[in-house]
Amino acid sequence: MKEIKLVVVGLTGSGKTTLVKHASQIPVVETDERSLRDIGKPTTTTALDFGAVDMGDVRVRLFGTPGQERFSYMWDDLLQGADGFIFLIDGSDPESLEAAREMLRTYREKTSIPFIVGITHSDVPRSMTPEEVAKYLELPEWAVRGVVATDRESALSLVGYFVELLKKGGRYG
């Protein structure tokens, strides 16, 4: 069975841990700790989240990164050997879009591996659409997809979509 390493990245609270949890077939390894500052949620990832899912002839290893800047030293380590990354943006928080664009720019400067953007909270009324975000980020629409990270089917759909793109491009295994 071939393996693909995907790194799930994004700002704090964008849904990285949630996506990894709901897409994984194995119990997820988490490194969440109680937040010492108000970041809009009670816990934060301090090292990584790890999960895995088999998709046909491919085992996908999912690595969720910490979103806080103070843990940015982990980002390069988690990108080592990665076949691609999924960049998550909270679609219900348009005020975070500029910070997300800057973080995506940082990742694109670190690596040339393929990526897609997932717009989380896409089930929330008035959430930004993938088309709006693609335009703002100056990306092709096929590279930006909506996802409900709390829904297993939606999480698997996003991961599966990216795996198929990687297969077509010959960029895995």
Image (cartoon, grey):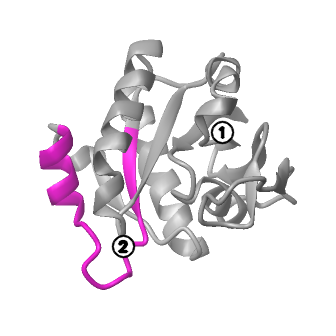
**What is the span of residues highlighted in magenta in the rendered image?**
116-137
Helix, strand or loop under label 1 = loop
Picture quadrant where residue 127 is located: bottom left
Q: Residue shown at 61%/58% (left/top)?
A: 39
The answer to whether 116 is drawn above or below residue 74 in the figure is below
- Residue nearest the observer in this picture, 131 or 90: 90
Write down the residue under mark 1. 65
Residue reaching furthest front?
37
Amino acid type of the residue tagged 2 in the rendering: Ser
- Amino acid tagged 1: Thr
Task: Say whether residue 130 is magenta.
Answer: yes
Q: Is residue 30 above or below residue 85?
A: below
Q: Which residue is mark 2?
A: 122
Q: Label 1 neighbourhood size at 10 Å, few (<14), some (14-19), many (20+)?
A: many
> Is residue 12 visible from the viewing direction of this image?
yes
Q: What is the secondary structure assignment of the residue under circle 2?
A: loop
